[in-house]
Image (tube, rainbow, N blue to C red):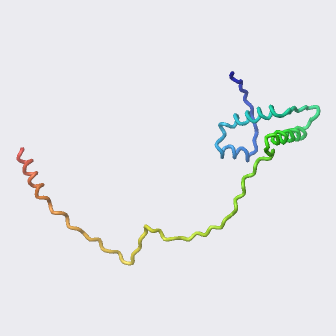
Amino acid sequence: MKKEKVKCGIYLPKEIYAELYRRQLPEDFSFLVACLLEEFFKRTDVNISREEMPTKAEQREYLKRKLKEFFSQTGQSAEPPKPPVQEKTELTYVQERPKDVFESAKPKPVKEEPPPPPEEGLDDILKRIESFW
């Protein structure tokens, strides 16, 4: 059975937006949100009553409480996990001379080799070719 889809706009904090692109998930974002919401609705009885909670602050506090309940059921924290802190290690760089660079005090003269003597067989071949004419 095919589920009908409806478009919904979401505003994200810049940090989450940047993380979404860093992890290369922008095309899967709507799928992830839909799955998370579906699971959230299955496991909680979330229902905002405007009469009981007229302000956005009250509504957000209620949702935060429900999120904490939801994550406690799965053994997770409602707070996003913080990235591990890497210890700073001091590195000292020793600049070594590249092995493929050679320096010499005096440049050596280049020996010129005399051209190789012409092959004797080549003259014979040329004479044979000329004889065909």
Vertical order, 2 against 50 (above or below): above
Where residue 90 sits: x, y (%)?
Answer: 65, 67
Farthest residue to the bottom: give it: 105
Farthest residue to the top: give it: 1
Vertical order, 36 against 103 (above or below): above
Farthest residue to the right: give it: 52
Using the rendered view, name the quadrant where residue 107 is placed.
bottom left
Using the rendered view, name the quadrant where residue 94 is placed.
bottom right
- Identified at 7% across, 49% down, the residue is 128
Where residue 106 sits: x, y (%)?
Answer: 36, 77
Camera-nearest residue between 119 and 130? 119
Q: Quadrant of the C terminus?
A: top left
- Identified at 19% across, 64% down, the residue is 115
Camera-nearest residue between 60 and 130? 60
Q: Quadrant of the N terminus?
A: top right
Q: Is residue 67 left or right of residue 25?
A: right
Vertical order, 89 against 36 (above or below): below
Vertical order, 31 against 118 (above or below): above
Where residue 105 sits: x, y (%)?
Answer: 39, 78
- Identified at 72% across, 55% down, the residue is 84
How many numbered dots are placed on residues in this image?
0
Using the rendered view, name the quadrant where residue 92 is placed.
bottom right
Where residue 95 sits: x, y (%)?
Answer: 54, 70
Q: Is residue 36 left or right of residue 22?
A: right
Q: Is residue 133 left or right of residue 55?
A: left
- Identified at 80% across, 46% down, the residue is 77
